[in-house]
Image (spheres, helix red, strand yellow):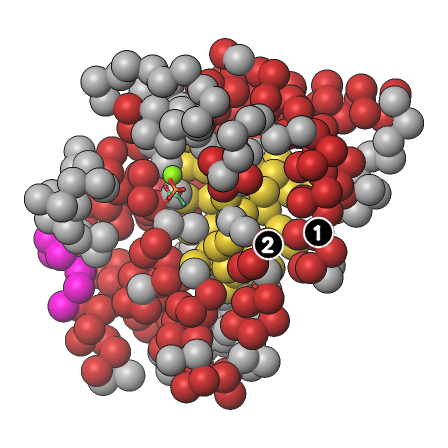
Amino acid sequence: AQSRYASLRDLPAQARCGTRIKLTMNAGLMADLPSLASSGAEGVGLFRTELQFLVRSHVPRRAELAAIYKRVMDAAEGRRVVFRTLDIGSDKVLPYMKPQDEPNPAMGWRAIRLGLDRPGVLKMQMQALVRAAQGRPLALMFPFIATAGEFDRAREMFDKVIAREQALGHPAPSGIEVGAMLETPSLAFAPLSFFRAADFISIGGNDLKQFFFAADRENERVRRRYDTLDGSFLRLIRQIVERCDEAGTPLSYCGEDAGRPLEALTFAALGVRALSMRPASIGPVKHLLRRVHLGDLSDEIQAAMDRGVENLRPVVLGCLSHD
Ligand code: PEP
Ligand code: MG
């Protein structure tokens, strides 16, 4: 499949109307990095940092992590890599962590909640990232932020880490971006000041969808029950786009749906200008994107949403067939 799209690799991800969409890839291992060049991704929009913690029998040491992050940045050759801080706890149990007995682990003590309550590991990870950057730009984002206050606290922790690293003689990154993953519906309703405070926002659609429809992403019985192109979900996405536009904050979408061509086009039509996906999806998404007039698609989707059409899939398919 990769070769079918190889000719597209160096062509811009641009719709017929001229709108550019930034296509980046998701990664989590050093072994994923060669896909940057082969897929034509513009960077890594989501680097999941859990794996380095899951494959070991002990908490990785700071120097070990810094070396890994440095290799990732080196391999990206100047392209932006967004490091997502640890999203562990509950369902992703570390071998060396005391298992928590939680009835609903996905809604439990995980990700940034754990990081704020037991900051040791998160701070160590932040230090490793600063040391790996060695004066280069650094982008990191916090998973599972549910309130503006959680973002402020995580950011404050990071600011302190940077100040301390500098005091210790480590060079500060040349530029710092701190973003939030929007993967709980509550954050879509946060005050505008939150959208202004974040340097960027990335929609974690896998979790956002599971909590929006109250449908467990791990449960085969219900996980495909609700369509991403359901009007209600798209109204939520539209609202997030509007809030980010109002605040002037860049927005991306990094859940699995960003790599599904129809979904990707729909998000782009609603104003999401960056999508992060598995490398193999870059070609198919770019292929379709280059064939459509996003402005026209947007008009049709918005009109259908305002008419109260319950599911937008037939509308999107219809637009593509006469495009
Ligand atoms: C998501 O929730 O959409 C996401 C990108 O994060 P993860 O799949 O790792 O939970
Ligand atoms: Mg998630």
67 lies left or right of 48: right
x 73%, y 56%: residue: 74
x 19%, y 73%: residue: 317
- Amino acid type at image mark 1: Arg
- Ranked by sequence position, the earlier of labels 2 and 1 is 2
Q: Secondary structure at mark 2?
A: helix
Asked if residue 170 can be seen in this view, the reply is yes
55 lies left or right of 206: right
Majority secondary structure in the magenta region: loop
| Residue at mark 2: C-beta within 8 A of ligand 1 | no
In the image, which disc is placed on residue 30? Answer: 2
Place of residue 51 in the rendered image (x, y in percent of width and height, measured from the top left): 49, 41
Identify the residue under disc 1.
71
- Amino acid type at image mark 2: Met
Spatial distance from mark 2 to mark 1, Cα to Cα? 8 Å
x 61%, y 39%: residue: 140
Place of residue 248 in the rendered image (x, y in percent of width and height, measured from the top left): 56, 44
| Residue interval drawn in magenta | 308-314
Q: Secondary structure at mark 1?
A: helix
Confirm whether the magenta stretch covers residue 46.
no
Place of residue 119 in the rendered image (x, y in percent of width and height, measured from the top left): 58, 16
Q: How many marks?
A: 2
39 lies left or right of 211: right
Can you say which quadrant of the picture contains the C terminus?
bottom left
Circles 2, 1 touching at the beta carbon (< 8 Å): yes
